[in-house]
Image: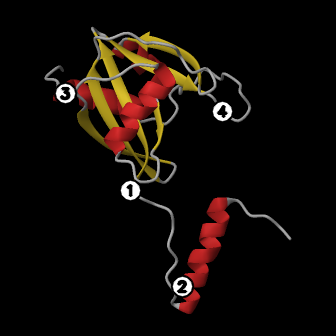
Amino acid sequence: MTLMALPECLNALQGFALLTGKHIVTMTNSKYRTSRCILKSRNEFLLVVHNNVQGINRGIWGLPGGRIDWGEKPIQAARREIYEELDTDLDELHDVGAWSYKGYQHKIYGTVFNGRIGRVDYSEILEVDWFTIEDIRDLAARDKLHAGFELASIEQFLTLLGHK
């Protein structure tokens, strides 16, 4: 017996559903795969290097956050993920929008952050740092942003806050 990865299984089942006319129920509860959060403090933004399967830090930065759990709203996932990864609670979250990456939609929120980062969960996060918008533009130019939407979403958040 050959084991298939989950996406292959779903594709096979969807193919079956098309052939037989039967409905296949998949475990999707949201149109978003992940929920990410922009933390702005003064003129800097928090970025992280998430852990990968190899546990190797390749210096590819992204927004903190992660997968949306079953039955969870994207805004709840943003708060939960930030608490799990950085041991901090967030104040008001602004809806920044959604961006596509690898065929999935990712929900982005932003907050003006006046708190402090607690304990970092190094099983999920390899590195944490604060960057100016110029630094983030430089990371984007050097292809050092994970999903590619980090800069655009941060610029959108600045626009929502009334900054240029």
Q: Marks 3 and 1: which is nearer the front? A: 1
Looking at the image, the residue that sits furthest to the bottom is: 20
Q: Amino acid at mark 4?
A: Asn
Q: Is residue 24 left or right of residue 154?
A: right
Q: Residue at x 55, y 83 (%)?
A: 17
Amino acid, disc 1: Lys
Q: Amino acid at mark 3?
A: Thr
Residue at left offset 56%, top offset 76%: 14
Mark 1 crowd level (few <14, some 14–19, many ≥20, 10 Å Cα): few
Q: Which labelled disc corresponds to residue 52? A: 4
Front one among 17 and 119: 119
Amino acid beneath label 2: Leu
Q: Is residue 146 left or right of residue 163?
A: right
Q: Nearer the viewer, mark 2 or mark 3?
A: 2
Dots 3, 1 in contact, CB < 8 A:
no
User: Tag on residue 31?
Assistant: 1
Q: Residue at x 58, y 89 (%)?
A: 19
| Residue hosting label 3 | 159
Q: Quadrant of residue 160?
A: top left
Q: Does residue 61 appear anywhere in the picture?
A: no
Q: Which residue is mark 2?
A: 18
Residue at mark 3 to residue at mark 4: CA–CA distance: 32 Å
